[in-house]
Image (spheres, rainbow, N blue to C red):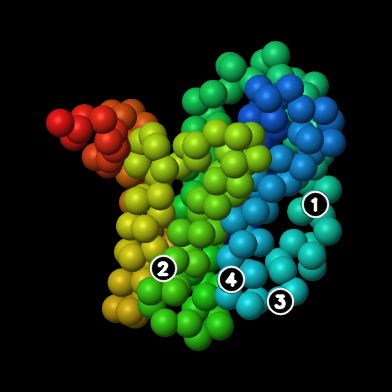
Amino acid sequence: MLTYIYVIAITAEAMSGALAAGRRNMDMFGVALIAFLTALGGGTVRDILLGNYPVNWTQHPSYIYLTISAGLFTIVIARFMRHLHQLFLILDAMGLVAFTIIGCNVALSLNYNTPVVVMAGITTGIFGGILRDLMCNRTPQVLQHELYASVSLLVALLYLFLLDRQVDHDINLLASFSVGLALRLAAIRWQCSLPVFSYAPEKWQD
């Protein structure tokens, strides 16, 4: 199940990256690059940090073709993308949960301790979006708007908790995925977010 969701998710993320590049008036190479980084950047950063070589996508060239093609295809259908906004939000939420669980499993397979496993899951879940926004010269949206990184954290913790309790793996996947998806969609629906820290030195000047 995760594999199919992963393929759908990297396609959707590649298309979101292409749209971000279009908002910055990038050429076709820029669109392809941002699409690739958005879709596969989280897993790449995770593998580098964990010393997990070779990096995942280098062993699956089809992921390169898929993400770049999705990015370039977005240019063709850009005029219709606003009608697919809600669908993209759902696919993005699914991708966040799937990436998080996959990241946790990679770290677990390498016998890392729990805190590292959690961070590996979060990194996989959110870092593609962070790279996209940094390349597009804007503050990462995953750290600003509705609950996103925190959903990834909760999914990782729930998944590991159920794993520790030796819950059947399929049930664990279903429960973690369902809870994570519900939390993310609820955050979008009701615009739930963490308190914002706004530092303005002039406010404290005498």
Q: Earlier in the sequence, mark 4 or mark 1?
A: 4
59 or 196, nearer to the observer: 196
Classify residue 16 as left or right of residue 196.
Answer: right
Q: CA distance from mark 3 to mark 2?
A: 19 Å
Looking at the image, is mark 2 or mark 4 earlier in the sequence? 4
Q: Residue furthest bottom?
A: 111
Position of residue 111 measured from the top left corner of the image (x, y, whole percent): 50, 85
Residue 29 lies in what quarter of the image?
top right
Amino acid carrying label 3: it is Tyr
**Which residue lies at the image location 80% right of the left edge and 21% below the top edge?**
76
Give neighbour class at mark 2: few <14, some 14-19, many 20+ (Cα, 10 Å).
many
What amino acid type should be assigned to the residue bearing mark 2? Val
Circles 4 and 3 in contact, beta carbons < 8 Å = no
Residue under label 3, please give it: 53
Asked if one can make out residue 183 in the rendered structure from this viewpoint, the answer is yes
Label 4 sits on residue:
49
Q: Give, as a three-letter code, the residue at label 4.
A: Leu
Q: Which residue is mark 1?
A: 64
